[in-house]
Image (tube, rainbow, N blue to C red):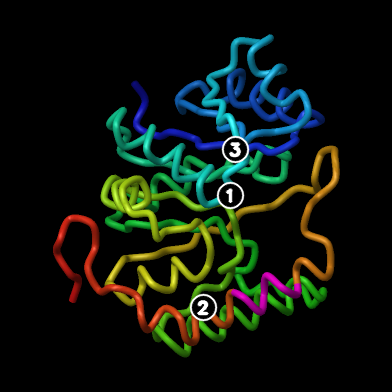
Amino acid sequence: MNKVLIVIPAYNEEANIEMVVRELEEGYPQFDYLVVNDGSRDRTAAICREHGFNLLDLPVNLGLAGCFQAGMKYAYYKGYEYAIQFDGDGQHRPEFIESMQKKMEEGYEIVIGSRFVNGKKDWSMRMVGSRLIEAAIRLTTGVTVADPTSGMRMFNREMIREFALNLNYGPEPDTVSYLLKQGAKVAEVPVHIAERAGGESYLKPMVAVRYMARMLLSILLIQNFRSKKLVNGKGRK
C-alpha cells in the first residue's frame, strides 16, 4: 500500500471523472486513490465501474462534508499516513502532490495547495471573498493562510483520524481555522489550479456570496463555541 490516498469526492462528474482517474493511474502510480461518488444522478458511478476504478459508491447525496468524511474513514481504517482532498473536475493538478507530501514530512499536520502563497493576487469577486476569509482567520488565530478556500488539502494521520471519527468536521476554511486554534501545524505550498475540464460548477455567484457569508460567520463567531477537545480526548495547547 502506498503512503498517500487521494480522496476524490465526485458529484455528477461524468464529464471529467475518467480523465482525472486515468491521469492518476498512468502518471502517478505511487499514490493510491479513491473516488467517492456522492449519490450522483448521472453516470459518474457507472463510468467508474465500467473501467474498474477504485470506487466508494454512496447510495444518497451526503454533501461534501459527509462525502469527504467517508473517504477519510476509508483512509483511517486502511492505515494511510496521508490523505489529500482532490477535486473530480480536473482543476486540481497531481504534479503538486509530491511537493505537498514533502512539506508534510517536515512535521506539518495540514498542507494546503495555495494559489497565492507567493504573493500572487487575483481580485475577481470570488477571490475577494477568499481575501475576507483570510483576514478573518488571521484575526481569530493570528495565522495567515494565503489561500483558505483552496480545496486541495493534505492531512496527516492524526488529522485523518479527526475527520474520520468526528462528525463536526467539514473540509472547509472554518474547520481549518478551528484546527489552527487547537494548535494544528498548517503550511502552504504553491500550486496551479486548472480550469474545470468539463461540466458545470455549482459555485454560481450567489452561491459563492452565501458561502463566503457562512464561512465568515462561522470563523468569527461559531468557532468560539466549539468543543476544545479532539476525538482522542486530549486538548491542544
Q: Quadrant of the C terminus?
A: bottom left
Q: Position of residue 82 (x, y in %)?
A: 36, 41
Q: Residues within 10 Å of mark 1 (few under 14, many from 20)?
A: some
Residue bearing the label numbered 3: 94
Residue depicted at 29% across the width and 47% down the height: 161
Task: Describe residue 182's horizontal placement relative to residue 22 as left or right.
Answer: left
Q: Residue at x 50, y 47 (%)?
A: 66
Q: Nearer the viewer, residue 229 or 150?
A: 229
Report if residue 224 is visible in the image: yes
Residue 218: give its label. 2
Three-letter amino acid code at the position of disc 3? Pro
Out of 51 and 93, give the one closest to the viewer. 51
The overriding secondary structure of the stretch rendered in magenta is: helix
166 to the left or right of 152? left
- Find out whether residue 101 is within the magenta segment: no
Classify 37 as above or below 175: above
In the rendering, which numbered label is found on residue 64? 1
Q: Residue at x 83, y 62 (%)?
A: 204
Q: Is residue 15 left or right of residue 53?
A: right
Secondary structure beneath dot 1 equals helix
Mark closer to the chain start, 3 or 2: 3
Q: Position of residue 120 (x, y in %)?
A: 69, 71
Please tell me how crowded label 2 is: few (under 14), some (14-19), or many (20+) other residues with Cα within 10 Å. Answer: some
Whether residue 117 can be seen here: no
Above or below — where is 23 with respect to 197? Answer: above
> For numbered disc 3, what is the local secondary structure?
helix
